[in-house]
Each structure stands twice: as structure tokens, then as C-alpha cells.
Image (spheres, helix red, strand yellow):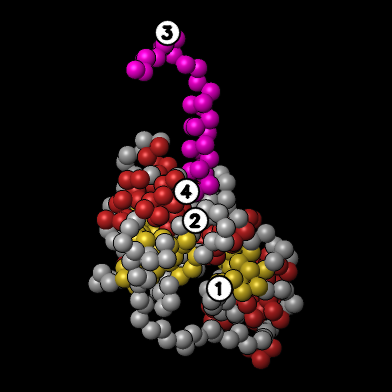
Amino acid sequence: MKTDQRRFTEQQLEMADNINIIAYAKSRGYELKRISNNSYKIPGYGGLFISGDGSKWNWFSQNKGGGAIQFVMEMEGKTWVDSVKELLGITHDELPIVPKVINHETKGQMVLPEKNDTYKHLFAYLIKGRGVDSAVVSEFVEKKMLYEDSNKNCVFVGFNEVGDPAYASRRSARTVGEVFKGDVRNSDKSWPFYHTGESNTLYVFESPIDLMSYLSLLKIYNINEFNHHMISLGGVADTGLMRFLDRHESIETIVLCLDNDEAGTDACLRIGIQLQDQYQLKRHSPKLKDFNEDLLAVIQEANNNREREPPEEGCEGEEIE
């Protein structure tokens, strides 16, 4: 490589590697799909993602990635030297303009839904319907991060740096019929529902119920030394993750516990592109679609095993007078 580099000056190499990969890909006819403001995906390439600013790419399934030079080498099958030559031969006039996405939306203040005078629907739904451990539910209720509103919805709350509610999502406390769920108006997803830990590791979930289900699974398996931070993104947007990392500089490892589906996989790959150079990244996928489904399956299996257990020998029972 050092011999090849002597063909070009440092300035030429910098010019080649600074070519916008998004613009280059579009100029060569590759189909690009915007995943978020921070990344693009090239469909049909098994998870090849390009960062939103066009500076780097990563093909996770092939364990490949890099800058513009490596992109040309991989996609065009060219040598390193020929790739640099091709990029140096491109003028900015030949490349399509990649507009920056600017969000001019201004939000008003979020107002939490009115509280109900009971928690019975919330407890019934989360504990009986979703299998969440009662102590886990009570913990978040006590922290005022979870309550029941006047319409019998579960409300999950995230707080900002001064302790004021900044994010809230609602989910109807029913297991049958039409399900209502969604963020409260003017919610700021950058202040997510969370569970505070003490380590330098962060576990990331899509929904509050998945986070609570994971805590419940830890209890079932008697894992008592879990002391990691946990957040839920309220979907697959990464704004909550980025703000959390900005405010917790001690984080070194991120464990992505997103859903076991296409959206969850894409989000893991997208987040990996942005953070792979700064953090150790791991994926901990549920066996089923999400960790609540895993929790319900574990509970069902335990119930089935109890039903199959034979009665104790010699137990005649007590006479009821």
C-alpha cells in the first residue's frame, strides 16, 4: 500500500476520500433508500449502509466498510490505485447535490394526559396481560415514570435534565379489540423512558414494555447482578440514544436489544455505522419478535410444566368441613 500511495500526493488522497459517497452512488445509478437523517441503505446488498453525511459506509454482513476509496473498490471491483484515479477524475459539478435535511418544526410544551384515580387497569394489563413482574411495574410507578390516564391508557414518561416530563407515550390497557398507542403531542423522543444503572454499559430497547419485560426476565432467571443502564427509543429513531450518550460520557459498550424484525435489524445496522468507531457495539436479539413475546413464552412454558407435574404421593388432601 505504501508503494501505491507514492503515486499520489497527500492532498490528492484527501481529495479522493472526501468525495461524498451518497452523491457518488447516485451518479453511478445505485438505488438509495433514506433510513433516517443519519443514514442511507442500498437495497439488495444485505445491509450496506451509508452515513447521512456521505463520509463513510459499512456492509455489516460482509464485515466491510470505510471511506469513498474503499466504496469504489468494493462496488466497482477496482484496485486501490484505479479507485483513487476514478475519484480524482470526478468534479463536483458531475456529482448530484445531496441536500441536507433541516427540521424547522418548533414544538410547543408537552402536557401530560390527565391521571386516573386508579392504577388497576394499568396493573392488570401489564402484569396479567403482558407478564411484567409486579415489582418492576411498581418501581416505575413510584418513580412517576408510569401511570394510568383518565382514558385507562398506560402512560410511559421520560424526564429532561431538570426533572420535568419531556416525553410520554400512551398505550391502551386492553388486550383485545382496537389498540390505541402513540406519543403524546409535543413529546421529545430525545428524553427517553429509562432505567438507571451503574456500569459503563447501555442496553437499548424499542419500547418501555420491552425494557420492563427484560427486567422481568432477569428476575425469573435470578440474575441479580445486572446493573446496566437501559433506555427505550419509543420506536427505532436514535435521538434518545444520542442524547443519552452525550450526557453519559462513561458509556463504553452499547447492547442493542431491538426487535427481531427488519426494522430492528436496519436500526441496529444504522446505529452501528454512526457509533462503531466510538463504542463497543453488541446485538442481543430476542428469540421471538421482541422481549415481551419472549417473556410471555417463558411464563407459558413454566405454566405448562407445572400442569404436567404429577401430584405428590401420599397427599390425600384435607377434609373440608
Q: Which residue is mark 3?
A: 314
- For residue 214, side relative to residue 58 (left or right): left
Q: Which residue is mark 1?
A: 36
Residue type at numbered disc 1: Ser
Q: Are marks 2 and 1 in contact (CB under 8 Å)?
A: no
Q: Quadrant of residue 43?
A: bottom right
User: Of the numbered discs in the image, which one, if any, rests on residue 257?
Assistant: none
Task: Please tell me whether mark 1 sits on a helix, a strand or a loop.
Answer: strand
Q: Of marks 1 and 3, which one's residue comes earlier in the chain?
A: 1
What residue sits right under mark 2 in the picture? 174
First along the sequence among labels 4 and 2: 4
Which-is-in-front pick, marks 1 and 3? 3
Residue at 47% across, 88% down = 104
Q: Residue 313: in sight, yes or no?
A: yes
- Residue 10: x and y in percent read 53, 78
Pointer 4 with pointer 3, Cβ within 8 A = no
Tell me which label, 4 or 3, sits earlier in the chain: 4
N-terminal-most mark, 2 or 1? 1
